[in-house]
Image (cartoon, coloured by chain):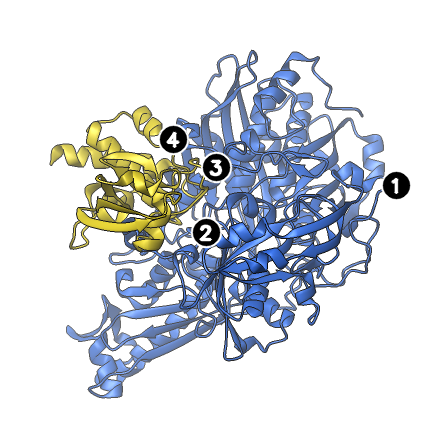
Amino acid sequence: MTIRTPERIVGEGAQVGRSMPRVDAGEKLRGEARYVGDMSVPGMLHGKVLRSPFPHARIISIDVSAALALPGVVAVLTGEDTLDIDPYWGHAIKDRPIVAIGEVRFVGEPVAAVAAEDEATAEAALAEIVVEYEELPVVGTLDDALAADAPLVHDGPIRPGLFHGLGTLPDRDGNICYRYGFERGSVDEVFEQAEIVVEGEYTFPGVYQYAMETHSVIAQWEGGEVTLWATCQHPFLVRAEIAALFDLPLGRVRIIVPYLGGGFGSKSYTKMEPITVALARKAGRPVRIVNRVDESMVTTRRHGAKTWMRTAADRSGRLLAREARVWFDTGAYADNGPRVTATGADSAPGPYRWSGVRVEASCVHTHTAPSGSYRAFGASHVQWAGELQVDEVARRAGIDPVEIRRLNLLTPGEQVRPGGKPLDADLIGDIRKVADALGWDEPREPGIGRGISVGLLAAGAHPVSSAIVRLEADGEAIVLVGSTEMGQGQRTAFAQIAAEVLAMPAERIRCQGTDTRFTPYDRSTGASRSTTLAGLAVQRAAAEVRADLMEIAGKVWPDAGDAVELRDGAAWWKGERRSYPELIARRFGLSGGQLIGEGGVHPEGTGSYAEGPVFWEVCIGAAEVHVDRETGVVSVRRTATVADVGTAINPLLVERQDEGATMQGIGNALLEEMVYREGMLLNDSLLDYRIPTIEDLPPEQVCVIVENADGPGPFGAKGCGEGAFAGIIAAIATAVADAGVRVDELPLTPERVWRSSQGQPKEDAKG
Amino acid sequence: MRYETSFRLNGTPVSVSVEPSRTLLHVLREDLGMTGTKEGCTDSECGACMVLLDGEPLNACSYLAVQADGREVTTVEGLSAPDGSLSALQRAFLAHGGVQCGFCTPGMLISATALLARDPDPAEETVRAALSGNLCRCTGYQGIVQAVRSAAAEIREG
């Protein structure tokens, strides 16, 4: 169910604001949509990766002779084959070898790769590779990593990658590869004098993003150029990283991105591309590698995190100070850990007015799978901890959870962090709406808990996007934009944005996947940025075409001036009509041509992280749960989320984004956890790692779409789809706490809930 | 050793020579070029590889191709009409936003098609039970449930 507020009135024929069916749905419903694993190129070999069985070991020797002797095996790649180049990659920190060199640091790290004529032969060849290892001490957990005498996962200097975007990276400190923190106002003094102090330690598990389509790449070297068909959310960043690794000019690396079977961050930045390119280089033929689920699970995952936090307030419930220390388990390689760490730190205070705040976040190596981006990273890790403490303050102050938030929330225009973007959303209005949608004030039965949560997420990433709109001689348009369609529906949104500007039906606009040879630059697909930033580039490109149409119309009707109206694919003046094909023919003659518009977005300042974000994504959720104290089973009965989107380009897509985020939030809060023991992953299949199924769908789910036209994107839009994720995790945690169960570790499995509800209630407050 | 295996695929007779260890999924995707059926977990957990075998939904990743001999296989490509027009169920998925990345869509359609063939008026719980073997990570399932129920109503009303 959706509620839209305020009710917007959109004009007849308007393209923006209507729930048109997705432009790509027909292909997907017919089974015609192609994903990388569905594609092949002439001469293509099949690649398989031999992965480390140990979390930490020295490689003594690798013997590939028996594998190479198998009929059908064309090449075997090992670390030695990469020593002619600088073989380390990583967009944040260059710490990850293409294939292990002398040492393995997590179970699943690539040790060798085989290219063969068919998959079965490649698989068989893996078993013929003989690797001799010497096992080394394992840093299995955050506590292990932070111990005084911990073995070091890495001991070399930090080598900054191309795209960390976080200024100068500090030196390593033991197993800590990055730190981010800030302090404002007077913290210690406030805590000493505060009437209410709540303190706790909270654990968030490592989780698997589970895009249904695993990481898949086809790599081809031909004529001094590399072409990749790859599952990447950020094709232009992958292009740059591959070019740097293999010492090629940018223009000689071509990335083609077909449909993606989900991303959620797991396909952001570089993943399986380097090893596939290296294997194709060795084999001298194109190679395709398609990960299995257990391989994708260790290619990247969400950071596990530990948070210590305390919150001070006065007895009326006025929040005074917050202090937090957060440790993110980034696994064996940094991946996007530094950015996750910074974003988590920024989310830790929550969107409240504080007299003092101190946050310190650390990105820590362990011998587990590398951790990177996953929807609403940072906020998902810490918002629930902060919101549990706000609720505890409310309980002690004797006020309602909605009321304490209303009292303390920032209002639009207030500073969220010094030097950055001020708050650009009406949070107080939003929480009232979500509370009403949930039925906050309705009486509740025994065993029922309700929770509400609010947070902010630095969204938009780096503001660089560009687009080209081409109006063809037949009046159909093509949008070229380098943002990736991974299910979120951006091709539909872009078509609607261009259509609105061009005053023509969106159904007549095609938006295809990225091919970096032809598609203009876009920084990335993530951080809820596509509609906002790439969409703005599309709007600007379409505006150029519109200006062209107006100029031609001015020649058709020299006396019309500004009175020409564009409507339904034609120019109109005094009842006379000229279709777009007629206008294009007028400019180019009978054979026609194209009207081409370009649009771009770039930072207004330096584009530094501190200046940002592009917008603050609102992370609001509310949940009603039932807790069975006998079995520990938590069932989610009702959820409500707010999609504070400025303007809904396509309300149906917005609603579906929030529902998807809600289900992933339910998964993260109640079900999902990558279970590691001593660096061994114990649940590396979908049988043992359970994600929400259709049976986990809550009976009632409401998405409130808020349209205050306060976004920086086209028509006042701003992104969505991540905020609800962090909001729902925190709402479920606070709802379970409201039902009387102490919560300090996710997921809230029946066992954890049962143990907690059977034990003596633990005081949250130590202060 | 290869076996001649013949079956009807979306109404058309096909014949392939296959090794006994190969799955129906791989033969469909690699030998017959029917890539609409997706390879997901290869563990019968996700449902992305579902096809109809004599009208019953089946995880093709865990079924040997030779077992299909003499039977009727329907893939997602066989659900729309030969002229490409969508079935009532496909139209409902379109209208209700039951498609996002599209990777689960073929399997979802297969499960739902089988459900509607045996139960023209399924309750919401029945829909959920029937689709519980099909994972979807994007949609949150809401649009899918709505689509199946609305298609059922449309089919009943003719």
Question: In which quadrant is the C terminus of chain A drawn?
Answer: top right
Question: Which one is in front in this view, the residue at disc 4 or the one at disc 2?
Answer: 4
The chain painted blue is: A
The chain painted yellow is: B
Cα–Cα span, label 3 and label 1: 40 Å
The chain ID associated with circle 1 is: A
Q: Secondary structure at mark 2?
A: loop
Q: Earlier in the sequence, mark 3 or mark 2?
A: 2
The chain ID associated with circle 4 is: B
The chain ID associated with circle 3 is: A
Residue shown at the point (25%, 34%) measured from the top left: B114
Q: Is residue B126 left or right of residue A612?
A: left
Q: Secondary structure at mark 3?
A: helix
Q: Which kind of residue does numbered mark 4 sit on?
A: Ser
Q: Determine which residue is flagged by label 3.
A: A662
Residue shown at the point (39%, 60%) measured from the top left: A39
Q: Which kind of residue does numbered mark 3 sit on?
A: Thr
Count neighbours of disc 1 (C-alpha within 10 A) and say few if under 14, some if 14 to 19, many if 20 or more. few
Cα–Cα span, label 1 and label 2: 49 Å
